[in-house]
Image (cartoon, grey):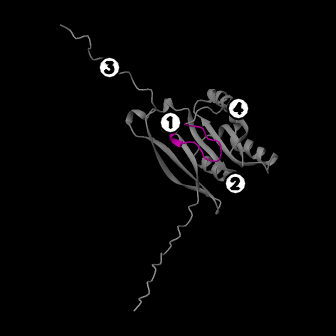
Amino acid sequence: MVSSTSEQPKPKSRRKPPSKKVLEGQIFSDKSVWTVHHGVLEPTLQANADDENRLFQVVGEKLPFSSLLAVKNHMRSRKLSRQGVYVAHDSMGCSRYVGRGNIFARLEARKKAYPLVLEYYSFYVVVNKIHEREVETLLIRAAGFLLEFNDRKKRVGLAPGNIRDYESGTVFYERHGKQKPVKKTIRKRAVIAKEA
């Protein structure tokens, strides 16, 4: 008799395989608050090394505008495309302008037009250029506070999203805050006077 519960192959998981964040170095420091580092997301599994499934070649999220020239020059030296989708953010991290094209020239123009408003920028270099318009449209439509429904990836404020949300092989730029020095406090023990 044949069992009705014969084993069937499990369907492939649709979950994104994990990636390992590898920092390669610091490329910018404002000497007071922010530094910008670059790195790459490496696959943790050999099957995850598929470049065809990546949407982005390079990403940078909520970097300080003062790092714009350093990031531009670093990408040029690595022969990375500087065409893509960009977002200009105010001091609270709110998106104020979304566009596409020459990322750094357009961001410089936005900063020059609104120097007191814009403090941070994000950019996304799309692997397949035909998707740039779709990414730009998505960002424009989702820019409002009321449209942020995904609690896991929601970022209102200065905190960037989790860099591991992107596919393996994606080059990234990440802002780091300067670590505050730890003050060592010596606790004094109460001296009990001897009473005779």
**Residue at mark 4 to residue at mark 2: CA–CA distance:** 24 Å
Nearest-to-viewer mark from 1 and 4: 4
Q: In which quarter of the image is the N terminus?
A: top left
Q: Is residue 134 above or below residue 196?
A: above
Q: Name the residue under label 4.
A: 140
- What is the spatial separation of the Cα atoms under label 1 and label 4, in whole angstroms? 22 Å
The picture places residue 138, in percent across and down from the top left corner, at: 66, 29
Labelled disc at residue 66: 2
Q: Which amino acid does label 1 sit on?
A: Glu
Q: What element carries label 1?
A: loop
Give how far across and how far down residue 192 sits, in percent.
Answer: 43, 84
- Three-letter amino acid code at the position of disc 3: Pro
Between the C-alphas of marks 3 and 1, the distance is: 26 Å
- Name the N-terminal-most of marks 2 and 3: 3
Q: Is residue 93 shown above or below 49?
A: below
N-term mark: 4 or 2:
2
- Give the mark nearest the N terminus, 2 or 1: 2
Which residue is identified by label 1? 167
Question: Dominant secondary structure of the magenta stretch?
Answer: loop
Name the residue located 70 percent from the left edge and 36 percent from the top edge.
101
